[in-house]
Amino acid sequence: MLTAKKEEDITEWYTQVIINSEFVDYSAVSGMMVFRPDSYFAWDTLKEATDAMFKGAGVEDVYFPLFIPERFLLKESQHVEGFSPEVAWITHAGKSELSERLAVRPTSEAIMYDSFSRWIRSWRDLPIKYNIWASVVRWEFKHPTPLLRSREFLWNEGHSAFATFEEAEAEREVILGIYEKVLHDYLALPGIRGKKTDNEKFAGAVASYSIEQLMPDGWALQGPDHHSDGQNFAKAFDIGFVDKDGSRKYVYQNTYAITTRELGAMVLCHGDNKGLVIPPKLARIQIVLVPIFNNIGKEEVLTYSRSVFELLKKSFRTHLDDRDEYTPGWKYNEWEIKGIPIRIEIGKREIESKSVTAVRRDTGKKENIKVDQLTDSIKSLLEEIHSNLYTKALKFLESHTFVVKDYEELKKHVGKGMIQAAWCGSAECETKVKEETGAKITNLPSNAQDRAKGEKCIYCGKEAKHIANFAKSY
RNA sequence: GGGGCCAUAGGGUAGAUUGGACCAUCCUACCAGCUUGGGGUGUUGGUGACCCGAGUUCAAAUCUCGGUGGCCCCA
């Protein structure tokens, strides 16, 4: 049972929902969590869908070691600086101390690029478009939250190498397009695509782009991202090739990722005071059948329920909840906490009218559906649920995106949503705003940049170069 | 990075100020049975816990120190 209300205490609500729904659990290791069947199914589905799109874009899956020799991690200075405070180290094997410490990967550049440097010889070896599905460990000292900030999380790590800067740049559109499609089609979540500022870019990158998402408490969460590494890593790891003209050049590289954090975003955005609301495509169980009987009509109801179950099972992930020890009302509540998209109630009335009663998780609306139209009706109902979830999330994002012209106005909206304001591009102004308001620049929204012309910086008043999206951020 | 609060069955709690009567309270969960069944049925019986280590004491869930873990606020 949930006691916290989402609109009153969202952090307590979040904890109660993910635990009580048996979505995830805490583990004995601080900051590290357990994916139970429902959350792992959702991730696995997301992963398979993303992977299929990657493969469509010519990306190949590989796997690299979990451990990275210390000397590799030290090769790119910004990279080291960014990650070293959070690295977990392997120092011993059994009782003997290792001659060189091994880092548990916080990200895989250092181990992958050592191989890249040996594999790439000629322009004919390029481009390389590799991806690994893996988990990484970042020993965060901020208070960990399951899915949103875990010390170990699952993700994809795309790593590409190109002969030219132009080719590398062209990849960004493809990958971010895939991520937006995954967010839209599977998680039913919108986002704001844009460039990160130099302060906020990935450690070692030349430029980072992200999809920023807005949570119901008015805070922003960084979603999937894509980084242009330029030749930084290529120079540090000596990834060179002989070009057509006979000269030796360094490759241009990109990296990109989507993580299990998205499941946290899904919980926050779609969930309600009854529990989780899982978008149909990510639901391990899409439809749950609850037979309603008393001792007299029991067999009849169960027989009818089983026939409906056999029918639905052919097209949907369906579960028949014929447990005898719980009442229908109890079952309704349980499946609602778990966020199952559709509940079907079957009792005497439904048998008489050769129908079922379907109840939507997202709206709670009940409707009677004749059995001979069941498969088609359920199919469109699931689609409706998905698009309703997306539309609601999009409306929330739109109604909580504030375009502001002066600093006082910006301050008023901090913590209440995305705040778009003109910015001169200086790190000083960015830092001052963050210090004074707590809001940072999440990114520079791609679709808003044409509005920067003629505007003045929200902080210093000098000529603006960008429209920046300010928000308090997870 | 700084400050504060907390730790008792699977979950939530009482017991602590005043160390003893506590083989530790209550709700929930779990197991067995009966009952019930269109929004968390009722009932009987049962299972299950004092975060870890050291100290003080005749006696520690309770006091002291250390550790570990969790939560909140500020940067």
Image (cartoon, rainbow, N blue to C red):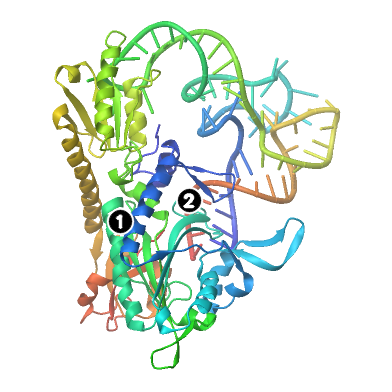
Q: Which mark is residue A145?
A: 2
The x and y percentages for residue A182 are: 30, 57
- State left or right for residue A27 relative to residue A53: right
The x and y percentages for residue B64 are: 74, 44
Residue A294 seen anywhere in this rendered image of the structure: yes
Chain designation of label 2: A
**Quarter where residue A191 is shown:** bottom left
The x and y percentages for residue B48 are: 62, 25
The answer for how far apart the CA atoms under marks 1 and 2 are is 21 Å
In front of the other: A456 or A118 = A118
Q: Residue placed at 61% from the left, 65% from the top? A: A103
In front of the other: B37 or A228 = A228
Looking at the image, is A211 positioned above or below residue A145? below
Looking at the image, is A92 positioned above or below residue A199? above
- State left or right for residue A231 relative to residue A365: right
Q: Which amino acid does label 1 sit on?
A: Leu
Residue A413 seen anywhere in this rendered image of the structure: no
Q: Residue placed at 24% from the left, 63% from the top? A: A402
Element under disc 1: helix
Element under disc 2: loop
Q: Residue placed at 21% from the left, 51% from the top? A: A391
> Few, some or many C-alpha atoms within 10 Å of disc 1 (few <14, some 14-19, many ≥20)?
many
Q: Which mark is residue A183?
A: 1
Chain designation of label 1: A
Which part of the image, by quadrant, shows the N terminus of chain A?
A: top left
Same chain, labels 1 and 2:
yes
Do the residues bearing badges 1 and 2 touch, measured as CB atoms within 8 Å? no
Between circles 1 and 2, the one closer to the viewer is 1
